[in-house]
Image: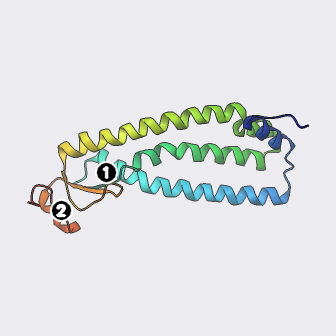
Amino acid sequence: MQPRFHPGQAMSLVIKEMDVTLKNRIAIIFFCSLMIGAFWLGYKLSVGTLSDIINGKDTIYYNWRSVPIFSFLPVIVYFFIAFFLLIFFPHTQQLGAFLLSGRGMYYLSIYLISAFFISMLLSIIIYFYPLSSHYQQCDGSGIFSGIHFVKAPASCEQFGFYSGKQAN
């Protein structure tokens, strides 16, 4: 009969016993390249919108998902560093094992849960305070798609929409 492990113990045992072979290194390098792509995509999707809001641009395309994506970018960096340490620096395997098991994942899950709730709250605050008070919303978007906000209501016509006040 095998003893039962909780997921943190099982992951730490797998990492401690993991032999860093060429096949494992290629798989981790492929995974790290996917993480770099995900980071770049998340950065492009979120930072442009948030910088437009901060700089007070005349036209802003706001998608509520920009803030959560931005808040989850450090998680991608966390996993990239952990896998990078495991594969390229064998003498730091204990640090990599700590980051990917037990306590490291505990701290990461605390960050993920708090970042999720804070970013959702910030998305709502950004929608209602800076955008709704200083900008005019252009109609024509669904709830899950982005919304164009403009300072001058006549600018909505360039997107093929009309401002909410002119749509009567």
For image coordinates 62% across by 59% down, the residue present is 34
Residue closer to the observer: 8 or 98: 8
Circle 1 — which element?
helix
For image coordinates 15% across by 58% down, the residue present is 163
Question: Where is 134 relative to 104, above or below?
Answer: below
Residue denoted by label 2:
156
Q: Residues within 10 Å of mark 2 (few under 14, many from 20)?
A: many
Single out the mark in the foreground, 2 or 1: 2
Number of numbered tags placed on the structure image: 2
Question: Where is 158 relative to 47, above or below?
Answer: below
Q: What whole-number distance in Å separates the C-alpha atoms at marks 2 and 1?
A: 17 Å
Q: Amino acid at mark 1?
A: Asp
Q: Position of residue 109 (x, y in %)?
A: 59, 35
Residue denoted by label 1:
52
Give residue 12's mark.
Answer: none
Q: Earlier in the sequence, mark 2 or mark 1?
A: 1
Q: Position of residue 130 (x, y in %)?
A: 24, 42
Q: Amino acid at mark 2?
A: Cys
Quarter of the figure with the N terminus? top right
- Colour mode? rainbow
